Image (cartoon, grey):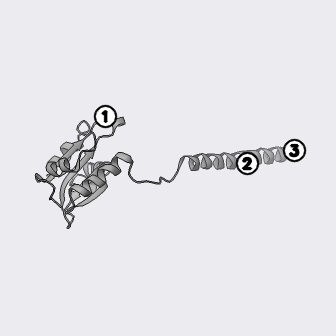
Amino acid sequence: MTLETFLLAGMTTFFAFFLWDKRKRKKAIEDKIRATNTVLNADESSMYFRLKKALPEYEVLAKVAFGSLITSQNFNIAHGMNLYVADFVICTRNFDVVAIIALDKLDNLTRSFEETGKDEVLKMAGHKTFRYNRVPHPEQLRFDITGTRLPEN
C-alpha cells in the first residue's frame, strides 16, 4: 500500500466519520426539540380565565418579558431583565400597566419570586405586584387588584 493510498483511505474514513457524527448530533438535537401544544399550563390557564372574569374591563396578558415592563440606561440591567418573564400583566385598554401577577409554581417554591429579586425590581419601577401560590377566586383577585367587588349581573 502506497503512502498516498494510505492517506486517502485515512482522510476518507475521517470525513465519513465526521459527517456521520454531525448527522447523529443533529438528530439528537432534533429529538430533544418538540413543539408545545399549549402556551399555558393548567394552573396558568385557570388563573388567566379567572383574571378575565374578575377584571372584564382590563386586558390580561400572559408571559410578558420584563424588558417590556421596565427600562434602564444600564445595558447589563436592561439585558438581564429580558431573561425574566411576568406570569400575567393586567393593563388598561390602552395597555398601561395596572398590576403584575406572579403565580408561584409548586415545583419552584424553593426559588420564589421574592428570593430572586424580581419583585423588588418591579416595585422600584413603580409596578404593583401580587403573588399567589394557588389560583384564587375571581372575587379575591378583583378585590386585591382594584379594591372593589365584582359588579352584580
Residue 116 position (above or below residue 11): above
Viewer-closest of 121 and 45: 45
**Mark 2 and mark 3: Cα distance apart in space:** 21 Å
Is residue 11 left or right of 128 when viewed as pictured?
Answer: right
Outermost residue on the right side: it is: 1
x then y, percent, for residue 99? 18, 53
What residue sits right under mark 1 in the picture?
109
Neighbour tally class for label 2: few under 14, some 14-19, many 20 plus, Cα within 10 Å: few
Residue 16: give its label.
2
| Rendered location of residue 36, percent (x, y) | 47, 52
Residue 61 coordinates in the image, percent (x, y): 28, 58
Q: Marks 3 and 1, Cα distance to the nearest angstrom?
A: 68 Å
The image shows residue 52 at horizontal and vertical percentages of: 26, 57
The vertical placement of 114 against 99, above or below, is: above
Which residue is disc 3 drawn over? 2
State the residue at coordinates (89%, 42%).
Answer: 1
In this orientation, which residue lies closer to the viewer: 111 or 137? 137
Q: Nearer the viewer, residue 9 or 95?
A: 95
Which amino acid, mark 3? Thr
Dot 1 amino acid type: Leu
